[in-house]
Amino acid sequence: MMIVHVLSGQISLNFSDIVSAFNTYDATNTNHIIFFEFRIPRMTMSILSGSALAVSGMLMQTLFNNPLAGPYVLGINSGASLIVALTLLTGIPFFTSDFGLISGALFGALLFGSIILYFSFYIRSNVSLLLIGLMISSFVGALITTLESMSAAEQLKSFTFWSFGSLQQTALNQLPLILFGCIVGFLGSFLLTKPLNAMLLGETSAKSLGIHIRSFRIWVIAITAILTGTITAFCGPIAFVGLAIPNLTRMLFQTQNHKYLLLGNLLIGGIFMLTCDTIIQLVEPYFVLPINAFTSLFGAPFVVYIVLKKLI
Amino acid sequence: MISLKSIEVGYDTPLLSANLSLELGNLYALVGKNGSGKTTLLQSIIGMIPSIHGEIILDEKSIHAMTNLERAQKIAFVETKFMGINYLTGFEYVAIGRTPYTNALGRLSDHDKMQIAKSLEIVGITYLSEKHTTQMSDGERQLLQVARALAQETQYILMDEPTAFLDYSNKRNLIEKLKKIAHEEQKCILLSCHDLEICLENNLSLLIVSESEKKIEFRNNASKEEILQLAFS
């Protein structure tokens, strides 16, 4: 799948290009440059974004004991969007640079992650916390719409393009940073597998099993903010994956043990995004599909199919 | 021994008061009206809700001076109903009871696995190990909860209305089993219950929430009339 992905795209590369790019890199060979500067980052981003969003979704669903939760519902994603909207739509030159955009989105995700974290200190029930997350989410959504209606056509266009989501904006030298964010998030999730399993029985039982609910919550929200923030910053707000992949993983792996679920989400999330992006690359000569639309376009019928197949 | 030293429990205003101790090897039934504070008392003992007045002492240590983990190794708590969780098997569910003893990653040692198998055996539901919890009957799931509490290897087990959703024969079966476990495993089990007849049939020690004084009265031998008089008049 990874090889198919790097070989597909507007400018065709063949297998020997890849081999020679690894063996004897030639800075003047266009195919070598395309491979390292565009294809490798895009392939890596597909896998990382899919895995990171799927893991975030799994964490949220277990924390809230609700299979409909995802990084979206806590407002972490919309927080990132709001800051990006503010920077793009106000058009201050520094902020519209790539660096400004990325730091803005990361800042937004962490800021809104902290807001929900702050509420979590005072709110005992997870359902109330979920409700507050949803309210923040729709409030921020409304703010963004207001900003959009007030801004000029050119700026509106660039924001709309950002919100389509994209896996190709990442440069090779940004990869280490993203990789670092994701690995921190994945390792953190791995260390949380024990309390995550206990949380299956609900908060009261988890507490009676010795789990410190408050610090567990803080860790889960912090890890989600890091994972979602990093991905949203570089790829835009990608919906669907965080909600659907964890459910799909549970169905396919038939387990509730978070050690396997974590691995499953890493795997299936990565494969799912890689497949989506390969298809996008293959049809690119004919028409352009934004990744944010395609994940749902391709994924939603697929998930419905799996659910129906399980029922029959 | 759990000592409730002139405690008052409730959220803002006291719901009920108690001054008594519970011994190992006994099954206690907490009876009283709906809303009389039975669940609040149970949750206070496991440290979910702070008590308004007085102290709860567990083997010479106040429960509020204990960490979550220390408490989890002393008291197990069983909620009214376990609905079952998709794809979770009986064995996996009982294994969650080992949470206070496993390492940071939750790896089950041979000792853990042995305890899980032993708990399933004591309750007599080894056959449920591989079954998915969503495919079990209410009665089976209730027994599974008991096995989970046993796997937690605590001296004390608190249960909130474990018989509420069971049919008559399952109710009797559960209470008889719990009485046997309390006696044979030398555990102290406290459960809240609305099934007076079954409690009386099994000669359980009764903690009755007195309606007039909002206070817990201890009775070892009480007639049904006396209980009705105390708790419901």
Image: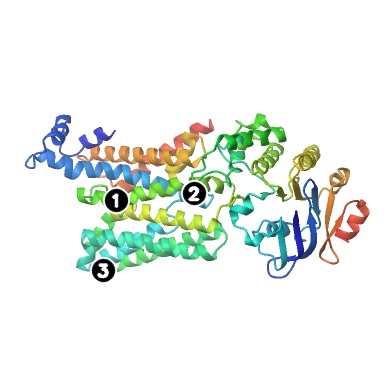
Q: Nearer the viewer, residue A213 or B165?
A: A213
Does A50 sit left or right of B216 as displayed? left
For disc 3, the neighbor class at 10 Å (few under 14, some 14 to 19, many from 20) is some
Tally of marks: 3
- Which chain is home to disc 3? A
- Amino acid carrying label 3: it is Thr
Percent coordinates x, y for residue A25 in the rendering: 11, 38
The residue wearing badge 1 is A178
Q: Residue lying farthest left?
A: A28
The residue wearing badge 3 is A90
Does B178 sit left or right of A260 as displayed? right
Residue drawn at point x = 20 percent, y = 61 percent: A97
Residue drawn at point x = 46 percent, y = 34 percent: A252
The answer to whether the residues at label 1 and label 2 have Cβ atoms under 8 Å apart is no
Percent coordinates x, y for residue B136 in the rendering: 65, 35
- Separation of marks 1 and 2 at Cα, in angstroms: 24 Å
- Amino acid carrying label 1: it is Ile
For marks 1 and 2 on the same chain, the one whose residue lies earlier in the sequence: 2
Q: Taking A233 as reference, is B83 above or below it? A: above
**Of circles 1 and 2, which is in front?**
1
Q: Taking A206 as reference, is A150 above or below it? A: below
Tell me the quarter of the picture where residue A298 sits.
top left
Percent coordinates x, y for residue A196 in the rendering: 51, 47
Is label 1 on the same chain as label 3? yes
Tell me the quarter of the picture where residue B36 sits.
bottom right
- Which chain is home to disc 1? A
Q: Is residue B103 in view?
A: yes
**Of circles 1 and 3, which is in front?**
1
The residue wearing badge 2 is A61
Q: Residue lying farthest front?
A: B60
- Separation of marks 1 and 3 at Cα, in angstroms: 27 Å
